[in-house]
Image (spheres, grey):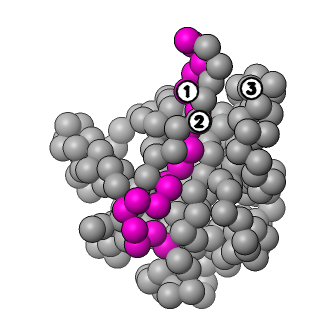
Amino acid sequence: MEFFPQAFLETAKKHPDFPCLEFRDTTYTYSEIFQLSLWIAKKIRLNFPDSELPIVLVFSNQWEYIPCFLAVWICGKYFLPLDAGLPEAYRKKCITETRSSYSIDERIFHEWKKEFDSENFSFQIPDSFPYPKDRNLPAYLIYTSGSSGDPCGVLVTHSGIMNVLKKQIECFGLSPGKRTLSFLSISFDASL
């Protein structure tokens, strides 16, 4: 079974200089996003070495989220996405329920990005990273909106992610060189 980090790596190998992500007036290639994801994965392994709990990703609907969730998966961990624009009480409730003490937000991301050096990069996922190999491992924990009561966490495994991604590519007619515009909050599954 193919997993997202490996699929992304293969795309980066085939189309390293193709635009992967555009934010405001900056374009990031597949190579740049993958290199940055590997760097963030190394920082996660150094700073959050033994976490079995989700790593909380707190971002606005911004480009920084994408290399971070990819990095979490490269490390064989899972994450809880929380939109920074959500009410603080809601975010605190979700974090408290998960008991996670590790989080990455825009401030931490930009600190780590300043240290990033793309000169020493090779296109492979290092063996020392326990990237997902079991489709039943958790990929992310998402909280419901709470519209019918209290929000509750739903653990999503890797088993369906590639199927959903392939179907979205087909439905939207995406291929190298094409693009899509997204305004989704990271707190919605579809933002992945």
Q: Which amino acid does the dot numbered 3 rest on? A: Tyr
Is residue 152 visible in the rendered structure shown here? yes
Neighbour tally class for label 1: few under 14, some 14-19, many 20 plus, Cα within 10 Å: some
Image quadrant holding the C terminus, namely top left
Q: Is residue 127 magenta?
A: no
Which disc, if any, is residue 90? 3
- Dots 2, 1 in contact, CB < 8 A: yes
Q: Residue at x 45, y 69 (%)?
A: 132
First-in-chain label (1 vs 3): 3
Is residue 27 visible in the rendered structure shown here? no
Give whichever of 119, 41 is nearer the camera.
Answer: 41
Q: Secondary structure at mark 2?
A: strand
Closer to the eye: label 2 or 3: 2
First-in-chain label (2 vs 3): 3
Q: Position of residue 77 (x, y in %)?
A: 58, 63
Give whichever of 11, 156 is nearer the camera.
Answer: 156
Neighbour tally class for label 2: few under 14, some 14-19, many 20 plus, Cα within 10 Å: some
Q: Which amino acid does the dot numbered 2 rest on? A: Gly
First-in-chain label (2 vs 1): 1
Q: Position of residue 134 (x, y in %)?
A: 40, 68
Image: 18 above or below 13: above
Image: 35 above or below 20: below
Residue beneath disc 1: 144
Image quadrant holding the N terminus, namely bottom left
Q: Main secondary structure of the magenta part?
A: loop
Residue beneath disc 2: 153
Q: Is residue 146 magenta?
A: yes
Residue range corresponding to the magenta coloring: 131-148
Q: Secondary structure at mark 1?
A: loop
Which disc, if any, is residue 18? none
Q: Residue at x 46, y 61 (%)?
A: 137
Q: Position of residue 19 (x, y in %)?
A: 41, 56
